[in-house]
Amino acid sequence: MSEIADSLILHQYEVSPFSEKVRVALAIKGPSWQACNHPSIMPKPELVALTGGYRRIPVLQVGADLYFDSQFILEELERRFPQAPPLFAGSGVGLARALSQWTDGALFMGLVGLLFGGDWTVDQAFLDDRSALMGRPFDPSQFAAAKPALKLQLRQHLDMLDAQVADGRAFLTGERPDAFDASVYCQILFARWGKGEAAAVIDGFPRVCAWADRVKAIGHGVRGADVGREEAIAIANSAKPAPLATAGGDGSLAPGDAVSIRYHDANSPPLEGELLSIDLHRLSLRPKLPELADMHIHMPRSVGDIRRV
């Protein structure tokens, strides 16, 4: 069981751009991994049971340790496999974090508008799910009305990427693939999962398309047999969390404090637990999950608000 408990399990679904970011990063770093597939919409009973209510994909599981948020997962892969090809050799961790605010923010949300404004067909269940997640109506008609502006924004984003590779470099930060490539490529692929309207805009930038083809060729690395959802929970229950590399406070909160995390998702319940470590960017806690054994959850502070209880 120890070998299974130490394996990398990516809780994902296939048509998930942020899961794709991690899949490309896993290929760059090289470790073997397995997928545990979940629905794209609620209910996700096994995922929320494992995470204590967190519903977003992807989540990385290593035994009894869980890691939330795609950018945070990339940093964890770099920490766990320092001898493997680096993920941040070109961008650096600090710049990669800043760039992810663009790729996961303005670029992603513009593509959401284009895709759900008519480039995808979605049913009412999906619309209801995203409305519940956001806490406000998810209205494709509003996206459709904004389509001209959204296409212009996409061309502006693509023009910046075109300028970045205009000198003939293979990847966005040089001759080696980087976390920044994974972060941008997953959004380009997201656009291509539509009916073709957003993809046609991308096709107008041949150098960007050639770069995307090079990233696509990296693949997804060494992917083993998929793990069932109940099996993933059993693995967590049978494993022990790894010792923390460091443990400290941030001046207002300290290890041992009873805390509550309120996620920014409108329909995710707060998670209570014992704080294990916190700094400016990340935190770790032992959640109160009576149905599960000892577990550690690690996340960036950006996913929710933390307070002492």
Image: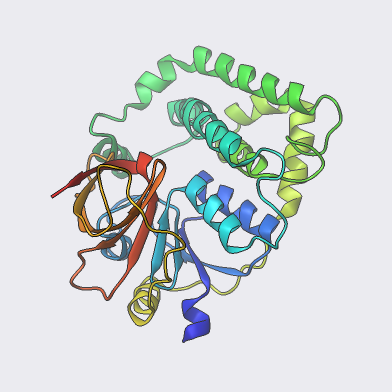
Residue at image x 46%, y 28%? 109
> Is residue 81 or residue 101 the one in the foreground?
81
Residue 274 location, x and y as percent?
23, 60
> Is residue 137 or residue 65 the one in the foreground?
65
Residue at image x 53%, y 83%? 3
> Is residue 130 or residue 20 the one in the foreground?
20
* 61 relative position to 99: left or right: left
Q: Residue furthest right?
A: 168
Residue 21 shows in the view: yes
Residue 31 location, x and y as percent?
64, 67
Residue 39 location, x and y as percent?
38, 56
Q: Residue furthest left?
A: 309
**How many labels, in total?**
0
Residue 274 vertical placement versus 175 (above, below): below
Q: How is the image coloured?
A: rainbow
* 41 relative position to 52: left or right: right
Residue 16 shows in the view: no
